[in-house]
Amino acid sequence: MDWLQITQALFLAAMMVFIFPMVKRSFNKPGESSGKWGSIVMPLIIVIAIVALLISFVQ
């Protein structure tokens, strides 16, 4: 493993550490249930798209 892969793994782990408590908190809130999945899935799709774009630029 080179330093780039180690850095990417650390950023991925940090992102998971920060995202999962927010997801858990949003499911525990009483209230509107129709918008929960959209508010969770949309940021994840954006992050995945940006990472895929950056990976395609590097290769």
Image: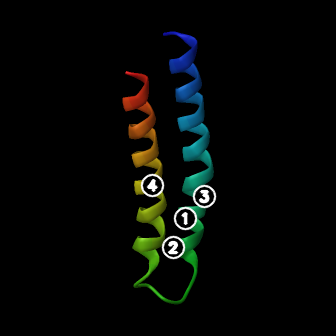
Residue 19: quarter of image: bottom right
Image quadrant holding the C terminus, namely top left
| Residue at image mark 3 | 21
| Residue at image mark 2 | 27
Going by the numbered disc 4, the residue's amino acid type is Ile
Q: Nearer the viewer, mark 4 or mark 3?
A: 4
Residue at 41% over, 72% down: 38
Going by the numbered disc 1, the residue's amino acid type is Lys
Residue at mark 4 to residue at mark 3: CA–CA distance:
19 Å
Residue at 52% over, 10% down: 2
Residue 29 vs 22, above or below: the answer is: below
Residue at mark 4 to residue at mark 1: CA–CA distance:
20 Å
In this rendered view, identify the residue nearer to me: 15 or 50.
50
| Residue at image mark 1 | 24
In this rendered view, identify the residue nearer to me: 45 or 6.
45
User: Secondary structure under badge 4?
Assistant: helix
| Residue at image mark 4 | 46
Asked whether the beta carbons under mark 1 and mark 2 sit within 8 Å of each other, the answer is yes
Q: Nearer the viewer, mark 4 or mark 1?
A: 4
Residue 56 vs 27, above or below: the answer is: above
